[in-house]
Amino acid sequence: MNRNLYFFTLMFVATLIILVDNTVSYRNAYMAAEDSTKLQALAIAVSLEATLMNVKKEDYLSARNIFRDIINEGKWEGIAFIALYERGGMTLLHSNHNLIGRVIKDEVLDKMTSTYEIQYAYITLGTGERVFTINMPVHLKGYKSLPVLRVALHTLEMDRIRAGSLVKAGAMTVVLLILWLLGILLWKAMKRTDRLKEELAERERLASIGEIAAVLAHEIRNPLGSIKGFAQYLLETASKDEDKEALNIIVSESARLENLTKDMLIYARPSEVKIEPVDPVALIRDVVDGFALQSREVNFDIIADFQGKIMSDRDKIKQAILNLINNALDAMDNRGVITIRLAPAMDGVLLTLRDTGAGIEDTIKKDLFKPFFTTKTRGTGLGLAIVKKIADCLRGEVSFISERGKGTEFRFFIRDLRDE
Ligand SMILES: Nc1ncnc2c1ncn2[C@@H]1O[C@H](COP(=O)(O)OP(=O)(O)OP(=O)(O)O)[C@@H](O)[C@H]1O
Ligand SMILES: [Mg+2]
């Protein structure tokens, strides 16, 4: 958990650093370009003011083309237009002489009626182009109210920086995506290694438990047989009721222990697989017939969407189905419906076994297949561990879904081992 936190914090910090660095360097470059454009605009405006100061008011008409000529002279680069406005918006001079005499209104000029400070502003032209303007009040002969000189510059440098930064942002996005992709792959690989390690440790632990269990079960079996045998013998000859009761307990508890040792041996014994043709439908009917006699209040519903034979280990499959049905019966208190369905699946058949029992608590779901895990007072907890082992050694799969109060469905995929 902690490692996940470190990992993602690291990724976020790396992403943040890249984004901040990108934004800051873009802003700096843009501001530098804007500053230099401002300086250029100011230089042009100041120099034009000097030129205009020499023109007399009555000469303005003959000076109509003065701005156009200045642009054509090519002394300054990047000029979009130059204009001189009277306060109020009347165009006194313009590099496009068709516009001379027009009254224009815009925010900047409006603002200039109340201030004598230079204003810098972006303006969008009729052509859609955005230009950078300096708006400067100038002292001209014959004008008491200072007219406004406007020099508009193309924003080439800034546009170039903006386009460059767009390309850079695109590249950064790709880099970040790759970084995240690699990060996530790495993280997944790490998790997988962790899981494999855990699985390996668990398997080793179970293997050693299995060995001990097998030895114990084997050692217990013989003396247990004698105990049970002698108790049965004594039971036949006992006359007192208390003796009979005590001997009965010895016999039934020995039988229970016998079952336990049997399960332990099934679970722990090295599993040899005997592959033969198996008719799964017939096998299920066989098993169910045995149960149907004992549990009369349970209805078995068999749906066979699969016909034919598969290659597998008959005894092992039978054992697994027995264990699953036993669990279902326990969960239903021997009352309800058990639906067993066989359906064709890729490379085998899928057996689903659904009961109408109590269902399984979410908290114990992860432990169900562990050996010796049981919620029953007289359970050994080996039933599902055996099913899992059988599924593993037949290269099948077993899983379940369950809802508390509604029932449980076990899915047992039996692989057809034809080509093995
Ligand atoms: N169909 C089911 N419905 C509800 N709970 C189930 C079902 N199958 C298994 N369980 C739960 O899983 C636990 C483990 O089952 P498992 O078959 O391994 O052991 P057990 O039935 O308790 O004992 P054993 O089968 O060895 O006598 C059970 O104790 C039970 O709580
Ligand atoms: Mg069981």
Image: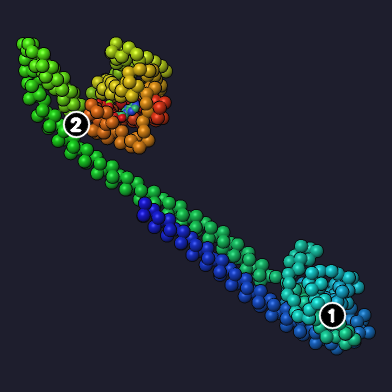
Q: Secondary structure at mark 2?
A: helix
The residue type indicated by label 2 comes to: Ala
Mark seen at residue 397: none
Q: CB at mark 1 closer than 8 A to ligand 1? A: no
Question: Residue at the spot x=76%, y=68% of the render?
Answer: 123
Q: CB at mark 2 closer than 8 A to ligand 1? A: no
The residue type indicated by label 1 comes to: Pro
Can residue 33 be seen in this snapshot? yes
Position of 332 relative to 388 (above/below): above
Question: Residue at the spot x=59%, y=65% of the render?
Answer: 165
Return the residue at label 1.
147
Question: Residue at the spot x=18%, y=37% of the render?
Answer: 209
Question: 32 or 341: which is nearer to us?
Answer: 341
Q: Quadrant of residue 50?
A: bottom right
Question: 86 or 153: which is nearer to us?
Answer: 86
Q: Residue 204 in the image: x percent, y percent?
A: 21, 41
Position of 346 relative to 31 (above/below): above
